[in-house]
Amino acid sequence: METAIIGGTGVYDPHILQEVREEVVRTPYGEAYVRIGSYLGREVAFLARHGQGHAIPPHRINYRANIWALKMLGVRQILATSAVGSLNRRLHPGECVLLDQFIDFTKGRPSTFYDGGEAGVVHVDYTEPYCPELRRLLLHAAKEASVCLFPRATYVCTEGPRYETPAEIRMFQRLGGDLVGMTNVPEVVLAREAEICYAAIALVTNWAAGISPTPLTHREVMEAMAANTEKLRALLRKALELMPAGRECRCHHAIRELGQF
Ligand code: HPA
């Protein structure tokens, strides 16, 4: 299959795919659980980032196994969803936002396939960390599906699993961050290393700490996701419908000069 969906918080079941089967894919980094189904006659993979029932916290997700498994299945593009807090007053809870940059505040997560030794040393370009072609396709799909999708935002990735302090949020604002979450790095990084196109749709579930008038809870995040999953599904369905078969992209040759992935 060529397309995969990675479902973040609140998106555990594709509810888009038919004839779904489960596969456990063995990788050098461990096993990954992937569901494979069909949509409009094409096979699509679905991976629940936090596992079924949200059992895996952000810092323990096996990002390398997940991306490696999708690569082994033949995936060439990933559409990801992500729950985020907002530190930009223009991006309100309930809104869908297309990520276009990230700032990495994770600590010590394995975040590369190129760990030296036999794997080699590789420095990959992230001038455009999210695939520009997939981003265009998603913006077009949003229009067609009448879903309001804010076209760009800078995502700050924290280590979690705790939420941020207001002082951290003020720092992220000064650094140019718009949204905060705990999972997009290293997922987006590994996808590029694996030469897979990657785009992420963030759903704003809450105002960030210190902006929100109330303390943050995982429950409010889950409730905001539940209230908006239909919108996300409509957008994903339209994107799958518009996705050209056999598409080629620069992302598929991201490390060409160093030998393919
Ligand atoms: N901070 C970090 N991660 C999040 C948030 C937040 O406010 N909301 C949803 N995921």
Image: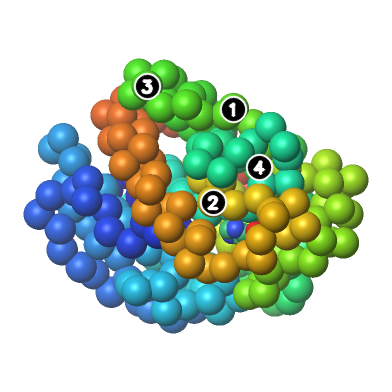
Identify which residue, 137 or 144, lies in the foreground.
144
Of the residues tagged 2 and 3, which is closer to the observer?
Answer: 2
Mark 2 CB lies closer than 8 A to ligand 1: yes
Under tag 2, what secondary structure?
A: strand
User: Looking at the image, is mark 1 or mark 3 nearer the viewer?
Assistant: 3
Residue behind label 3 places its C-beta within 8 angstroms of ligand 1: no
Residue 23 position in % (x across, y down):
23, 69
Disc 4 secondary structure class? loop
Assign a secondary structure to mark 3.
Answer: loop
Reading the image, the residue beneath label 4 is 129
Give the spatial CA distance, label 1 vs label 4.
Answer: 15 Å
Q: In the rendered structure, which amino acid carries the disc numbered 4?
A: Pro
Picture layout, residue 192 above or below residue 137: below
Residue 111 percent coordinates (x, y) = 66, 67
Find disc 1 in the rendering and name its residue. 151
Q: CA distance from mark 2 to mark 1?
A: 17 Å
Residue 253 quadrant:
top right
The numbered mark, 3 or 4, whose residue comes first in the sequence reads 4
Q: Amino acid at mark 2?
A: Thr
- CA distance separating discs 3 and 4: 26 Å
In the image, is 77 to the left or to the right of 242?
right
Name the residue located 48 percent from the left edge and 67 percent from the top edge.
219
Q: In the figure, is residue 40 to the left or right of 215? A: left
Tag 3 residue: 146
